[in-house]
Image (cartoon, rainbow, N blue to C red):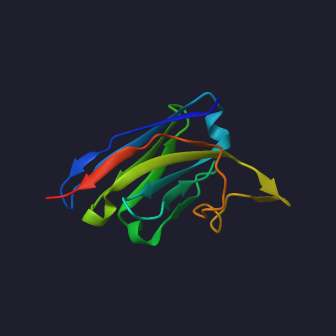
Amino acid sequence: QVQLVESGGGLAQPGGSLRLSCTGSGFTFEYYAFTWFRQAPGKEREGVACITNNHETYYEDSVKGRFTISRDNRRKIVYLQMNGLKPDDTALYFCAADRVKYTYGSPTLNEATWSSPNYEYEAWGQGTQVTVSS
């Protein structure tokens, strides 16, 4: 059973940094892609960053250059390093995982699909709250 547990959230000042962690268990970590999502009160859930099993990365435009997603397959952890935090980054951050699948020889999860609300991830974590405020 795929299980994901997020940690590392908290309160940060504008311009500050936080590092989120998503720890996986119950599955073969290196066969999976992972995406960080966030949802602020009253707003739609949005994809923040994605890392594939081949370490390809994708980012939402507003976090490019500020956030970095990485993975440690040995420790079964996916990280989201968040620098230059802004009040608009305040949200509940979720980690999602999906085993790599192929359609007609191409990865089903790719640059076009990773943040789509129609893409069905296999598992989700419970989330960790990030609040950016002075």
User: Residue 38: where, in percent of width, then height?
Assistant: 43, 56
Left or right: residue 36 versus residue 107 is: left
User: Which residue does the image show at 51% across and 44% down from the upper left?
Assistant: 71
| Residue found at the very far left of the displayed protein | 134
Residue 73: image quadrant is: top right
Quarter of the picture holding the N terminus? top right
User: Residue 122: where, in percent of width, then height?
Assistant: 65, 44
- Viewer-side residue, 68 vs 95: 95
Residue 114: image quadrant is: bottom right
| Residue found at the very far front of the displayed protein | 42
User: Which residue does the image show at 47% across and 64% down from the upper left?
Assistant: 44
Left or right: residue 63 versus residue 132 is: right
> Is any part of residue 86 visible from this angle?
no
Left or right: residue 44 versus residue 86 is: right
> Is any part of residue 98 visible from this angle?
yes
Figure check: 36 above or below 112? above
Quarter of the picture holding the C terminus? bottom left
